[in-house]
Amino acid sequence: MLSPNTANQRQLLKWRPVHGLMIALALIAPLVLTAWLGGDEALQRVKHFPLGLLLLMLVMAFLCWNLNAARLRLMLNGRAGRLGQRGALGIELASKFALCATPGGGGGAATLLLLLAQRGFPPAKGAAVFLVDQGCDLLFFLTMLSGLVLFSLVSDTQWPHQSLVQWALVGLAFMAALVSVVMHYLPSLLRSPSVKTAWPSRYRRRWLARRLLRCRHALRVTLKLPRSTLFMMMLLTATHWLMRYSLLYLAVLGVGGHADWMWTFLTQMLAMAASQFSFLPGGAGAAEVGVGSLLLPLMEREQAAAAVLVWRLVSYHLYLAAGAPLFLLYSYRLLHRSPTQ
């Protein structure tokens, strides 16, 4: 007989026709928007994109995957069994595929926890690892935004929409502060009478409280890793995002456009934040419109449309293509496991 956890895991991996439809729409959206914004000339610019520059972008994407895999190994610190770079890369690609294939990226975290659980790593501790991963990203972006906003104030920059950058910094700082306060005061918040409501049930509240407290404990244990390990995690995080967010800059150069690297970096951060409001996987539609609209003040429509398409092909569609086989393989293994296992 299947355990409840196993049954829930198998239910998570079941494919539904709506999933295929949404992914198809996400794949088509960049092409439709490119044709609408830039027309045939934009498609011609994509067709004549320099091959050497495209290969460089592909190599950079591959390096980004491996940097994230190395960071995952550091965060686990041997607590999920013997995990080599190849195994960590498989988990990274499968998780990123699920993130890119679900609206809001909700499937990414669930897939990561599921794959770690298959290695004997409890979901509560896996959630703590995921929080540390997100915390590293949040700290990096907060630092970058602070530096870039300061740079825009003390230097003669010609960026459009500078107020958007400052509001993004405020929002990101608020999120970081909110998560930190909630995790710090979690025991007191759980004991507060205000959480004793009719719904959810008492059993559900206790179940959720136990897992949140375990997650908090595991998070504290993870943060107590040696300083050298934590430093390496942040170094890998910074290298990954600096490299990945350089892809748009290279795409702009490849279509003959001109834009400041810092502006393309900020453009991606702002547009990807706005893409969370898209109902399509990977923020399709919103991401392209957001980046394209922020590039338009600096270049022609055809150039902006072509650059956005190349950027999405390397930063989004490539994740789907590389991660899909591994996701399907892991899903097949789990769904066809013996019920006694």
Image: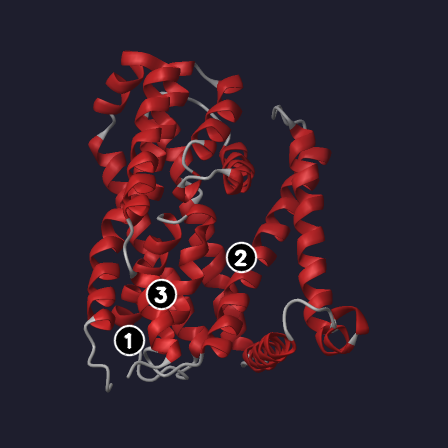
Lower sequence index among marks 2 and 1: 1
Label 3, on which residue? Answer: 69
Q: Residues within 10 Å of mark 3 (few under 14, many from 20)?
A: many
> How far apart are the alpha carbons under marks 2 and 1?
23 Å
**Between residues 237 and 37, which one lies in front from this camera angle?**
37
Q: Tell me whether the residue at label 2 lies in contact with that at label 1, contact meaning CB atoms closer than 8 angstroms.
A: no
Q: Position of residue 318 (x, y in %)?
A: 28, 45
Furthest toward the bottom, the residue is: 340
Marking on residue 328: none
Q: Position of residue 138 (x, y in %)?
A: 58, 56
Residue depicted at x 55% and y 42%: 273
Residue 250: name its quadrant: top left
| Residue holding disc 1 | 84
Taking 254 as reference, is 186 above or below it?
A: below
Q: Label 1 sits on what residue type?
A: Gly
Q: Which element type, helix, strand or loop, lies under badge 1?
A: loop
Whether residue 48 can be seen here: no
Residue at (31%, 68%) from the top-left corner? 10
Residue type of the residue flagged with mark 3: Ala
Q: Secondary structure at mark 2?
A: helix
Residue beneath the point at 71% across and 67% down: 182
Question: Measured along the vertical axis of the image, is residue 90 above or below residue 168?
Answer: below
Measure the C-alpha gap from mark 1 to mark 3.
Answer: 9 Å
> In this figure, which residue is indicated by the disc labeled 2?
137
> Where is the N terminus found, in terms of image quarters?
bottom left
Q: Badge 2 local density, few (<14 within 10 Å), some, or many (20+)?
A: some
Measured from the top left, where is residue 282 in percent x and y? 41, 43
The residue shown at (27%, 13%) is 40
Q: Which circle's residue, 3 or 2, is located before the other in the chain?
A: 3
Where residue 83 sits, quadrant-wise, is: bottom left
Q: Earlier in the sequence, mark 1 or mark 3?
A: 3
Amino acid of disc 2: Asp
